[in-house]
Amino acid sequence: MAAGKSGERTPTIKDVAKAAGVSQATVSYVLNNLNKVTPEVDAHVRRVARELGYSRNRVARALKTGRNNVIGCIMPSLLSPVFPEIAQAVQQRAEEHGFATFVIDSGLQTATREAEAIRMLADHGVDGAIAVLASPRAVSDRRALPLVVIDQPMDGMDSVYADHRGGGRLLADYAIGLGHRRVGLLSGLQNLYSSRERREGFIEAARGSLDIVWDIEVPLVPSLPSEAFDALGRRDASLVVCVNDLIAMTALSALRQMRIRVPEDMSVMGFDDMQWSGWPLLNLTTVRQPLGQLGRDAVDLLVRRLDAPDAEISNITLPVSLVERGSTQPQVKDQEPRPT
Amino acid sequence: MAAGKSGERTPTIKDVAKAAGVSQATVSYVLNNLNKVTPEVDAHVRRVARELGYSRNRVARALKTGRNNVIGCIMPSLLSPVFPEIAQAVQQRAEEHGFATFVIDSGLQTATREAEAIRMLADHGVDGAIAVLASPRAVSDRRALPLVVIDQPMDGMDSVYADHRGGGRLLADYAIGLGHRRVGLLSGLQNLYSSRERREGFIEAARGSLDIVWDIEVPLVPSLPSEAFDALGRRDASLVVCVNDLIAMTALSALRQMRIRVPEDMSVMGFDDMQWSGWPLLNLTTVRQPLGQLGRDAVDLLVRRLDAPDAEISNITLPVSLVERGSTQPQVKDQEPRPT
DNA sequence: GCGCCTAATTTAAACGTGTAAACGAAGATT
DNA sequence: AATCTTCGTTTACACGTTTAAATTAGGCGC
């Protein structure tokens, strides 16, 4: 419909150059803000470019420069309440730095899918990635895709994670302060750094003051193994400490089914302070980890690494804090838990 | 470590060609599965490529072909429980088709950010996108970025959405069947197609059988305006129908705070059947919309459109179904709701 | 045995950029 | 006045692919 050779094509730098009566190189220099051209030429080129509705082809750009201004964000699940919170922060911060974000759901617990995700991002010319990984093995093929790991330290890589161990201690201290004595643990699988640290921090601070009457490793999915169900039903603990809020939520559901009241019959504590933990329905006492901050710091770290590939490696630990809510109450002293 | 001129560089098609003793074109033909080469050459090239750890550079590929094998997925929020469920399905199905997925959080309710997201995707050379949009205005600049819209029909575009109106009717019918008479509505903002349809479907089927004692438009965020809070507290309805499960969850929280028991004092119904609605804690009677299917169908539609840009436009409506759970109970006939 | 068709392979030109190097026209230096 | 800088601009090649067109090799009919 339009005149000339270009039917309806989106304009290229060549079109701009021709229309402005200069060379492609000049246009390129102008658009990249390298101060190489006369002010009047600069202005002219910009005007023409705007008039044509020109915008740079990022694909060609990426091919030439090797930089794409795209980062990846690998999360174990988008259905979890906590990872999307990180992902959202990552995306927003990345955009502030001029980067777009690929979000990829790597699926829970599968090292191969994690490796695949990394590989795929690299293939797509992504500049770097931020990842919450279940298995460190995933990065065996670390063919120079800059990576920032969230939620755990990892040798040779930038990382940012919350003080899981300290959080575990906070929980123990709080439990002790409330006068509890007999506690049950729903620990996460101990091959995960965060689960391990939380548990160890708790046990460390509990030593001598709390009896851990049971301690069950559960996978981080919203359903409890029957073993855990049974333990809860035994009522031999006055408080149950969960590896995260999702598990705590699941425990609350299980307790509700068993007509065990929270916190009257049993107190429950979680970890994360996910979005819904503060709602009246859950009202969960928990340890808050700064999810958004985790994502933002990771992006900053990644961008820094892209600008200076040889900068020294950073491991950022973020502080956590206890959030007291209604799922816990003081244990009347010497009150023995009544068996069913 | 490797030999030859390539220090540590990731191998290109040229390297493979040289190592295999054939031309680039041959390698390209092999890798694209165009049956143009002799079986033995084919096998040889594949072996060499594997040995070098070669994988195609998708950026260069995209530049040449104009196709990137990447689609975008624009969601109003990743924090909501329902959109990630769609996004996950989209990503998985896209991968089955050989596409990677950009997930973008456009933020709630902002036409400009939606337009920006589309623009950004287009700039990045994405082939097409799937979007849940608040405002149809966002696609004014439809410079030929193929788009499939989820959750509403849209003239001139492929779309896939659940039968919101039918769902609304299901809710009304069920309420009538339970013997309820006086109901309250927490409707979503009526500028959203889905909210409008749900409400209208409900009202349509309720006519003559149900008294809608109040009807309040609430934004789709997990907090109720005080007006809604007051209405719930009035207790003049025996059942409250919510535009979606998130609002229903919020209502349940509010009711809990007010010590109004569900379902004994008041029944609650939602819409979506999001991930947590089935949990004992919520146990929400709701209308199930096939979220995953929505995403998968959208991807299929988009891929079809990419292959055949001139195919006729499809609007897919997916059926919904009622899910009976514990948040509703029959209304004892003629029992007037007691005022506080 | 020569031309001709088909099949397999290679050559070479794009795709839209960025940028080093070449270029030319001043003004400055001798 | 001739040569040297300096600055602004252009020329030309590269990035890693795909693919149309050219080339080569084989096989077949006459």
Image: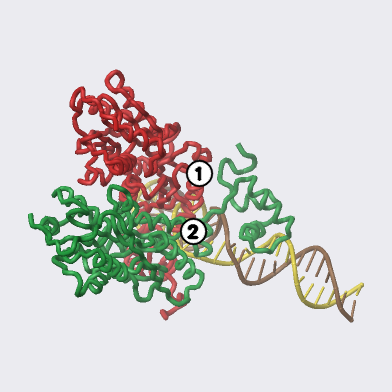
Chain colours: A red, B green, C yellow, D brown
Measuring 50% from the left and 73% from the top, which residue is drawn there? Answer: B308
Q: Provide residue A130's location: percent of width, then percent of height.
A: 40, 44
Query: Which residue type does callout 2 highlight?
Result: Phe
The answer to whether residue B323 is left or right of residue B232 is right
Q: Residue furthest top?
A: A208
Category of crowding for the residue at label 2, using alpha-carbon neighbours closer than 10 angstroms: few (below 14), some (14–19), many (at least 20): some
Q: In whole angstroms, how far apart are the C-alphas of marks 2 and 1? A: 17 Å
Measuring 18% from the left and 48% from the top, which residue is drawn there? Answer: B256
Measuring 16% from the left and 65% from the top, which residue is drawn there? Answer: B182
The answer to whether residue B300 is left or right of residue B75 is right
Q: What SS does tag 1 mark? A: helix
Q: What SS does tag 2 mark? A: loop
Category of crowding for the residue at label 1, using alpha-carbon neighbours closer than 10 angstroms: few (below 14), some (14–19), many (at least 20): many
Disc 2: which residue: B99
In this orientation, does residue A313 appear? no
Residue situated in front as seen by the camera: B242 or A112: B242
Measuring 26% from the left and 46% from the top, which residue is drawn there? Answer: A276
Q: Chain of mark 1?
A: A
Q: Chain of mark 2?
A: B
Q: Residue furthest front?
A: B333
Residue situated in front as seen by the camera: B165 or B127: B165
Q: Provide residue B63's location: percent of width, then percent of height.
A: 50, 61
The answer to whether residue B248 is left or right of residue B17 is left
Disc 1: which residue: A115
Q: Provide residue B323's location: percent of width, then percent of height.
A: 33, 59
Query: Which residue type does callout 1 highlight?
Result: Ala
